[in-house]
Amino acid sequence: MFEHPTHATRPVVRRIVLVAAALLATACQSSDCPEGEPAISALSADKTEVAAGGDVTLTIAVSNFSMTGHHDDGHDEEHHDEGCGNSGHAHVYLDSIEGELLGMALEASITVAIPDGTTAGPHKLVAQLQDVNHKPVEPKVTRDVAITVK
Ligand SMILES: [Cu+2]
């Protein structure tokens, strides 16, 4: 008997969907596209006191987030897919996210310079997760570490 054409075409459609899913998975490895709520699980500085103009090296530990970079870092083009989610980098600000942007961390460690002229006393270095377009990950993920400027 004549079989309705949709019965014959359905397995082909399913195969195309599977191939497309496999290609997407290859273009964006699952380890680079973590799921779940992204977080900065730890933020530490290599020193607690620093002179204005001096350097501080921060170590940023993240969970459910992949440090893949951003759109204009000149590498890692395959990760510049909006659909990848939970990937990007971290901004480091002085005192608050409205404060001066000191640097962009593309990996777990970043050295930033405390600006000349920063007033002596207690300050904070604030790290915030950003997507590949330098937009804060929503809901916003920030963590700070206290430093004293001498
Ligand atoms: Cu950025």
Image: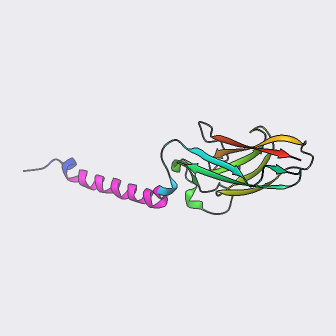
Q: Is residue 39 left or right of residue 126?
A: left
Residue at the farthest left position: 1
Q: Is residue 90 left or right of residue 78?
A: right
Residue placed most toward the observer, 4 or 49: 49
Q: Main secondary structure of the magenta part?
A: helix
Q: Is residue 44 left or right of residue 79?
A: right
Residue at the farthest front position: 48
Q: Is residue 111 left or right of residue 19?
A: right
* Residue 60 locus on image (x, y percent): 65, 52
Q: How many marks?
A: 0
Q: Residue at x 50, y 52 (%)?
A: 33
Q: Residue at x 81, y 41 (%)?
A: 123
The colour mode here is rainbow
Residue 22 shown in magenta: yes
Residue 13 shown in magenta: yes
**In the picture, residue 70 is in which quadrant?**
bottom right
**In the picture, residue 15 is in which quadrant?**
bottom left
Residue at the farthest right position: 117
**In the picture, residue 46 is in which quadrant?**
bottom right
Q: Which residues are magenta?
A: 8-30
Residue placed most toward the observer, 97 or 80: 97
* Residue 52 locus on image (x, y percent): 89, 50
Q: Residue at x 55, y 53 (%)?
A: 81
Residue placed most toward the observer, 49 or 65: 49
In the displayed structure, 136 sits above or below 44; it is above
In the displayed structure, 44 sits above or below 121; it is below
* Residue 106 locus on image (x, y percent): 66, 57
* Residue 110 locus on image (x, y percent): 72, 57
